[in-house]
Image (cartoon, rainbow, N blue to C red):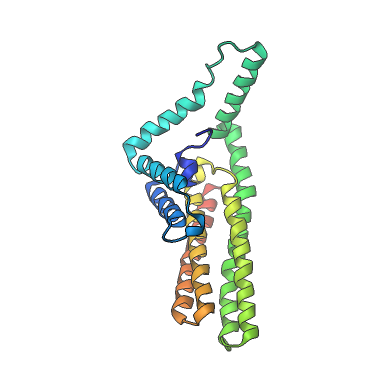
Amino acid sequence: MGNSNHYDTLDIPQAATQVEIKQAYRRLAKQFHPDSNRAVTDHEQISRINAAYEVLSDPQRRQSYDQELAHRLYGTRFDTEGMSPGDRQRRAAEVQKRYREQYPTGQAADEHLQLWLNQVYTPVNRLLSRILRALAEEIDELSADPFDDELMEGFQEYLEDSHTDLSQAQRTFRSMPNPPNVAGVAAHLYHCLNQVSDGLEELERFTFNYDDHYLHTGQELFRIATGLRREAQAAIKNLA
């Protein structure tokens, strides 16, 4: 198992809500299910995902598991029998570092928050803005003649650029655990990223068959994503 845990398996923070746990499980179950995507089927990973969800979806089992994680984190502090003084010092420093990273307080908490805002929230917010704000103009241009090859190529280029921006935003979002006091902001961003991802899939389907249903669904998902992004921005302002 190494340093991984059920939260890592579901790719969620330890402060995730039950709704976020369920959504993460559904997303991963769909991604690795053999009937939906044989190219990425991984039976061991599916087993890990199921085991993680079984524990974290049960509040009592999750509480016990969290206690187990805490014991695993701090238990190494005392496991120093037979070590040289230098090794014991290095082990103590390692445990203290892990504690500070997991539970920063005081000035460290403020620094953690500022770092998260600068390195996660700001770039993710900027990338989402670039994707969401461009859609209306892109659709206006395409509406002149959806069957015009040049206009359609321009729309497809926008979708490709948006996928690139979305991938970068998703990587950035996962690059650092969010501080506890911005859990709500992180949740809004997480759901916003998912809505954008689903919206891009619908818009791509439109380019294959010109069915307006997919175009309208994509627009609606982007509308929801825009609302989530605004809620994240409002929550950030409330921190001040």
> Above or below — where is 1 with respect to 163?
above
> Above or below — where is 222 with respect to 82?
below
Q: In this orientation, which residue lies closer to the viewer: 214 or 93? A: 214
> Above or below — where is 76 with respect to 236?
above
Image coordinates for residue 182, horizontal then vertical, percent: 51, 46
Q: In this orientation, which residue lies closer to the viewer: 111 or 150? A: 150
Q: How many marks?
A: 0
> Above or below — where is 212 with respect to 2?
below
Image coordinates for residue 89, horizontal then vertical, percent: 64, 17
Q: Residue at x 41, y 60 (%)?
A: 35
Q: Quadrant of residue 131?
A: bottom right
Image coordinates for residue 104, horizontal then vertical, percent: 56, 33
Q: Residue furthest right?
A: 86
Q: Residue at x 37, y 37 (%)?
A: 62
Image coordinates for residue 160, horizontal then vertical, percent: 62, 69
Q: In this orientation, which residue lies closer to the viewer: 209 or 102? A: 209
